[in-house]
Image (tube, rainbow, N blue to C red):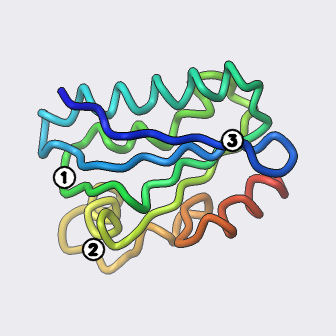
Amino acid sequence: MKPPKVTSQTVADGILVVAFEGSYPPGSRGRPVAKWMVEHAATLAHDQAARAIVIDLRAFAYEWGDEMEWIYDVGRSCDPSIPQATVVSDSNRRALSTLEWGLGTKHDITEIRYVFDSLEEAVAFVSAV
């Protein structure tokens, strides 16, 4: 397993932004990557005593594999009270939408209240929670 590149930074008021760059192996081959991403982001949040977390997937390609939905639970895995948001891009939007609603869906993943197209929107969301 080759883990994705990860960068992190703390922005206003203890909000941790964890950005992943790379790609998710298709199907069940992606399971170790998903597990690593969640564990790594949760460790960063814990070690930095983050008040909130934003997962930035704008530079992360994803086509399919059920475990990718684990990324929405990073905050809960280290502290259930930590607000979390996720930022997506065209490199993963369609696949995340089908993961949520099934193949052929007309829904967009950003219809979920904690998933956004921009980092600014995600930071604003977790700031308000």
Q: In the image, residue 82 lies at what x, y percent?
A: 72, 35
Residue type at numbered disc 1: Trp
Residue 85: which disc?
none
Quadrant of the rendered image containing residue 29: top left
Question: Between marks 1 and 3, how big is the CA–CA gap?
Answer: 27 Å
Q: Report which residue position mark 2 lands on.
A: 105
Mark 1 Cα within 10 Å, few/some/many (few <14, many 20+)? some
On-image quarter of the N terminus = top left
Which residue is pictured at 28% across the width and 69% down the height? 94
Q: Secondary structure at mark 1?
A: loop
Q: Of tags 3 and 2, which is closer to the observer?
A: 3
Q: Secondary structure at mark 3?
A: strand
**Horizontal and vertical percent for residue 33?**
28, 32
User: Badge 3: how crowded within 10 Å, few (<14), some, or many (20+)?
Assistant: many
Disc nearer the start of the sequence (2/1): 1
Question: Which of pointers 1 and 3 indicates the residue nearer the eye?
Answer: 3
Residue that mark 1 sits on: 64
Whether label 2 touches label 1, CB < 8 Å: no
Residue 31 coordinates in the image, percent (x, y): 23, 30
Q: Answer few, some or many: residues within 10 Å of disc 2's Cα (few below 14, many 20 plus, some between 14 and 19).
A: few
Q: Secondary structure at mark 2?
A: loop
Between 80 and 63, which is closer to the camera in this rendering? Answer: 63
Q: Is residue 40 left or right of residue 102?
A: right
**Tags 1 and 3 in contact by the CB under 8 Å rule?**
no
* Mark 1 vs 3, N-terminal side: 3
Determine whether, in the image, residue 96 is placed left or right of residue 83: left
Percent across and percent down for residue 66 are 25, 42
Q: Residue at x 31, y 63 (%)?
A: 92
What distance separates the C-alpha of mark 3 from that of mark 2? 32 Å
